[in-house]
């Protein structure tokens, strides 16, 4: 086995090279014609690409993000440590104790397209968030395939078997609940899906799954009905729901048919409220970043060491609110059930009025882990953008690594030169 010092030295060189490339590489790596052709071919609609570009000009970045191989490996080790923790009965009992009733029952599915979001720091990658309905994978797969690799020292981070892995994932989710076979009809479900910013990827997901032999519909959750033990979309019975709703507990009145079908086990839902409670409730980050608690729950020391890299997180309570306010500059404050950066506040920018709302509860305080930067070129101007790196996984196995390039407090798709970016591993 190589000496630890040698491994660390190699990681340092890799990290320095990636930083140099992120600061100075402006090679045109996105093959725009190839991307347009592959998207058109996938959906069979020549207007698809033109509409996507016209309505979502900052969805896809033209420049890649360079990721050190050591950081890529470390991210996967963190994912494996989280998965190991979630498998512990004691961990599951701890996180489910505060979960709603609908999340208590385990129907079997592990959760399609888990998303682990990292900031890249000088100390290594820091896990800042876990998502159970992580968006963007289908779009990022096309982006990764359309790269002209400009530097011989890098390689795309897309599994060559991405399409097959996605099909296997949905079949596995079905078997985990039903035991055998595969679903005949899949519904990709969101609220007003055609109005969602990521609607184009619903179309890509539909095309991929239909090519694998599934009947696939894109459905508004409000259009579903539950009758005679069957979930319906119009006259079509639904076997499996690929759930993109941000109503993680299916609590809204408009989602009652889906909620009742799920609770009755009449439809396979992935990801579902149980998976969200185990992984994506942000209060879990407080437990995952508490080494003492993890040891007491029985997590092996190797996994505990991996999770020591997480930013320290605490739930905001009446008992610690005054101390957190005093140290607020060290933290980001995030709503427990938040998504997409909504309701997130930097501690150094908090007003007293906002803090009065936060201290009532429903928030976590997470130590700040500043994101790395990618310099992008817009016309002749160079701009510094922040970078989040997302690892898409299923059952702890990597499917795809992608980045989001942005300016501002949290990720968005309003930054010229920004958007989803392919990740190239150094």
Image (cartoon, rainbow, N blue to C red):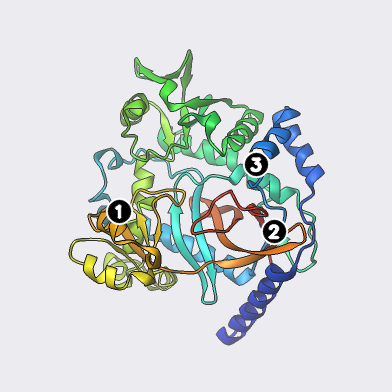
Asked if residue 193 is positioned above or below residue 375 in the image, the reply reads above
Q: Which residue is mark 1?
A: 92
Q: Is residue 159 left or right of residue 409?
A: right
Residue 81 appears in the rendering: yes
Q: Nearer the viewer, mark 2 or mark 1?
A: 2
Q: Nearer the viewer, mark 2 or mark 3?
A: 2
- Which of 207/386 is in front? 386
Q: Residue at x 40, y 72 (%)?
A: 308
Q: Which residue is mark 2?
A: 64
Which mark, residue 163? 3
Q: Residue at x 33, y 39 (%)?
A: 249
Image quarter in which the C terminus is found: bottom right
Does the CB distance between marks 2 and 3 fall below 8 Å?
no
Residue 1 appears in the rendering: no
- Which of 84/320 is in front? 320
Q: Quadrant of residue 328?
A: bottom left
């Amino acid at each position: 086995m190589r000496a630890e010092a040698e491994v660390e030295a190699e990681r340092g060189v890799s990290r320095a090279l990636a930083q140099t490339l992120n600061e100075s590489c402006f090679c045109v790596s996105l093959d725009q014609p190839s991307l347009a052709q592959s998207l058109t071919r996938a959906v069979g609609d020549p207007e698809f690409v033109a509409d996507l570009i016209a309505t979502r000009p900052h969805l896809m970045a033209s420049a890649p993000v360079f990721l050190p191989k050591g950081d890529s490996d470390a991210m996967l080790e963190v994912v494996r440590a989280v998965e190991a923790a979630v498998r512990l009965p004691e961990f599951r009992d701890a996180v489910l104790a505060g979960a709603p009733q609908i999340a208590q029952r385990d129907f079997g599915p592990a959760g399609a397209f888990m998303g682990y979001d990292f900031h890249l720091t000088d100390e290594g990658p820091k896990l800042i968030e876990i998502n159970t309905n992580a968006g963007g994978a289908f779009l990022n797969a096309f982006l990764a395939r359309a790269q002209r690799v400009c530097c011989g020292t890098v390689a795309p981070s897309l599994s060559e078997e991405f399409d097959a892995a996605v099909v296997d994932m949905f079949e596995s989710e079905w078997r985990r609940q039903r035991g055998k076979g595969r679903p005949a009809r899949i519904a990709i479900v969101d609220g007003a899906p055609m109005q969602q910013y990521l609607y184009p990827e619903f179309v890509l997901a539909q095309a991929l799954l239909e090519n694998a032999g599934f009947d696939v519909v894109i459905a508004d959750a409000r259009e579903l009905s539950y009758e005679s033990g069957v979930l319906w979309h119009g006259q079509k019975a639904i076997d499996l729901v690929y759930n993109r709703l941000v109503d993680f507990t299916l609590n809204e009145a408009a989602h009652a048919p889906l909620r009742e079908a799920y609770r009755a086990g009449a439809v396979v839902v992935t990801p579902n409220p149980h998976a969200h409670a185990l992984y994506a409730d942000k209060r879990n980050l407080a437990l995952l970043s508490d080494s003492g608690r993890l040891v007491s729950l029985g997590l092996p020391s190797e996994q505990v060491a991996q999770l020591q890299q997480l930013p320290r997180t605490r739930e905001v309570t009446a008992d610690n609110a005054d101390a957190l306010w005093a140290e607020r500059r060290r933290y980001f404050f995030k709503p427990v059930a938040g998504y997409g950066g909504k309701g997130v506040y930097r501690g150094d920018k908090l007003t007293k009025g906002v803090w009065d709302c936060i201290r009532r509860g429903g928030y976590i305080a997470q130590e700040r882990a500043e994101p790395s930067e990618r310099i992008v070129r817009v016309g002749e101007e160079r701009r510094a953008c922040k970078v989040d790196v997302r690892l898409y996984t299923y059952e702890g196995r990597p499917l795809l690594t992608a980045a989001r390039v942005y300016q501002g407090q949290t990720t968005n798709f309003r930054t010229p030169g920004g958007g989803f970016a392919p990740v190239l591993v150094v």
